Amino acid sequence: GIQVEQSPPDLILQEGANSTLRCNFSDSVNNLQWFHQNPWGQLINLFYIPSGTKQNGRLSATTVATERYSLLYISSSQTTDSGVYFCAVVNTGKLIFGQGTTLQVKP
Amino acid sequence: GAGVSQSPSNKVTEKGKDVELRCDPISGHTALYWYRQSLGQGLEFLIYFQGNSAPDKSGLPSDRFSAERTGGSVSTLTIQRTQQEDSAVYLCASIVGTGTNANTGELFFGEGSRLTVL
């Protein structure tokens, strides 16, 4: 089946710093989403981005489907950005999640 | 409803008992997914429904796990003879889906059902 790899697995930032999270996938996909799981376990939709670039405030995402990767950019990070960031892709019907990037933003 | 609703939010049970977890998807969403998340781990796919049928049950861990969906809406995940390793948060999500394509559109999650097996 399709493999979804996220990097880095862990990231520690000082408040105000910028970061880039990466999601690589091993096969073609027709759906890709980024989620943020906050410390209380709630999964929050960030981007539905099977291709192209989207921006929402301090966050933006780019998916290059032909090269099988997606990037999530976080600018001017805040402590509330802490948590786990997951990408998820659809291939042969199933929505498969990567293992996530755990982000800690220190004040 | 306005969002995906799951119940119970918390369930503590004794080893060997059966449990039922319920998911009420967003109105109009034809596709529904179940995932499991153990402490500190990623999301493990269990099963998905397109309408009332389940094209892919490959993620169900054992024959103690079953799921059904009726009326193209509410789904129930049943775990029989629970074991301690079943302890996890069970997450349900729904997606618009169109026709035979269960993957169209954005996926929305409920807040999960936390299961603890003593």
Image: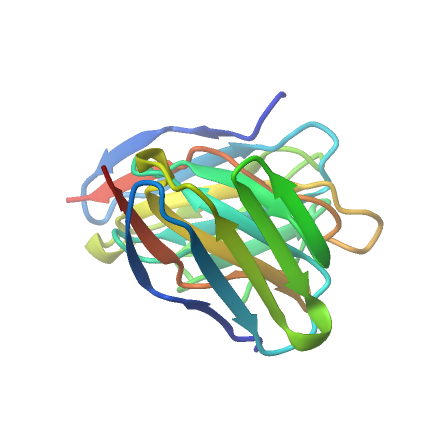
Q: Nearer the viewer, residue B84 or A80?
A: A80
* Side (left or right) of A5 relative to B73: left
Q: Quadrant of residue B24?
A: top right
Q: Is A8 left, or right, of A44 in this rendering? A: left
Quarter of the picture holding the N terminus of chain A: bottom right
Q: Does B73 sit above or below residue B97? A: above
Q: Point out residue A40 in the picture as x, y percentages from the top left corner.
A: 31, 34
**Residue A106 versus residue B44 in the image, above or below:** above
The colour scheme applied to this rendered structure is: rainbow
Foreground residue, A19 or B7? A19
Residue shown at 51% from the left, 42% from the top: B92
Q: Residue furthest right?
A: B99
- The x and y percentages for residue A93 are 68, 63
Residue pictured at 85% horizontal, 50% vertical: B99
| Residue A97 picture location, percent across and down | 49, 60
Q: For the point 65% across and 61% down, which residue is it?
A: A63
Position in image of residue B13 (x %, y %): 22, 38
Numbered circles on residues, count? 0
For residue B59, say whether it is visible: no
Q: Nearer the viewer, residue B63 or B72?
A: B72
Task: Report which quarter residue B18 is drawn in.
Answer: top left
Asked if one can make out residue B13 in the rendered structure from this viewpoint, the answer is yes
Q: Quadrant of the C terminus of chain A?
A: top left
In the image, residue A55 sits, relative to residue B81, either above or below, namely above
Closer-to-camera residue (B7/B20):
B7
Q: Residue furthest top?
A: B1
